[in-house]
Image (cartoon, rainbow, N blue to C red):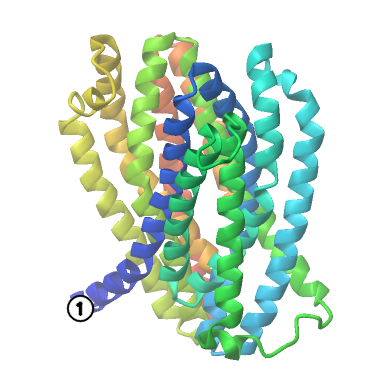
Amino acid sequence: MSQSKFFHESKLLAKLSGPIVVGQVGQNLITLADTIMVGALGPLALSASAFAGSVFIVFLIFGIGMLSPITALFARMQGQENYPYGGVLLRHSVFVALGVSAFTIGLLYLLAPNLHWFGQTPDVLELGSSFFKIITWSILPSLIYQTYKQFTDGIGKTKVAMYVMMLGVVLNIAGNYVLIHGHYGFPKMGLDGAAWATLIARIVMAVIMMLYVHVHPHFKHYMQERWTHRFDHHLLKNLIRLGIPNGLTYIFEVGAFSTAAVMMGWFGAGPLAAHQITISLASTSFLITLGIGIAASIRVGYELGRGDYSLARFAGFTAIKLGGAYMSLCALGFFFLREWFPTFYVKDADVIAWAAQFFIVVAIFEVFDGVQAVAIGALRGMSDTQWPSIIAFFAYWIMGLPLGYLLAFHLGVGPVGIWIGLLIGLIFAAILLTWRFHVLSKRFLKN
């Protein structure tokens, strides 16, 4: 395989992933803006929003994970040039998003009176309860936006969702300013104002995406079938069959890192603070890898739709190599600047020392994290979500966390042992997911 083919494929992946990464940064900016602007209300409001948000985000992440495999289906449709089917697929995807929204919102409202199960102080529960109920409703517009984003991303129009997301950032910040503090004649709503600002921004984002797709002439040839036409129950079941394992994959990963943070807290405030710094920087570097993974699912799905299985395999492995190469550069930065990065957050020598130790492990961790994230995307492009879910559960919950616990608390390694456990889990995930893509793509070639 020539170098020119590799560079051409890399350019295609970069073109697709660039706007996706910017959109992911926008999502992080919304969270950052909320944290800063709520923080001005004091530590109690910040604690209440952090607690409510940490419970809420698990359900939102599951919903987003449910819808993520649809991107590859749109890409495959685009490769087949079966444009009317794109509209059919979008209609069914919206129906799935509505169903998932109703299910998750219902669960959150059943949970709302029982937030005391999480052992928070009464003042945090009192302040966070109202915030929790308001932000719960934002799941519906979030998943509608996400569905239309899968459509536009899948057909290669990745800039559409990026622009809408950046508008959402501006709206959220403006809404926080007006509603938290009661400017321009609006009532002073405090923490609830932040929840309303998020809900309004997400509603506007969903409406703009819907209007753009249904009104813009570019999408006219996708919308040839009336949306009042009967549903294809086989297609609905297929979307749910693909979505549930992928949603669980998201939960397994997020849950593992949340559990690792809880275990780190058992060592005290210093290691926990260092852990938060380390995971914050590692998560920032991960955004580009996440974009490459989504681009991989689009490219693999598109080429499968065209019937070019060889190029689908090549696109997947090119993306995996790019993810690993990029994260290798990040790893070098984390290793050689391990004592400098933490100083952006704290001046405490003990916290900096712990973070520097963690970054040594993270330098290796980054490479395998990049490979596994992109491999999941490539497999999603082949509509393979069940095995990645099983592998994620095995890697994090059967290997990573138990090994981390054993090393940290029974074999005398200490806090670094938790990160070593996560590293071992990621190594297995990267190897097994890449092997799975190799086997599955080979199978396509033989058939």
Residue 402 seen anywhere in this rendered image of the structure: no
Mark 1 is surrounded, within 10 Å at the Cα level, by few (under 14), some (14 to 19) or many (20 or more) other residues, namely few
Q: Position of residue 247 (x, y in %)?
A: 63, 50
Q: Position of residue 120 (x, y in %)?
A: 65, 15
**Residue 11, picture quadrant:** bottom left
Q: Position of residue 436 (x, y in %)?
A: 50, 58
Q: Residue at x 65, y 12 (%)?
A: 121
Dot 1 amino acid type: Ser
Report which residue position mark 1 lands on: 4
Rendered view: 278 above or below 134 = above
Q: Is residue 131 left or right of residue 283?
A: right
Q: Is residue 353 left or right of residue 193?
A: left
Q: Position of residue 39 (x, y in %)?
A: 45, 26
Rendered view: 408 above or below 72 = above
Instruction: Please name whichever residue, 97 or 189, is drawn nearer the observer in this view of the structure.
Output: 189
Rendered view: 72 above or below 107 = below
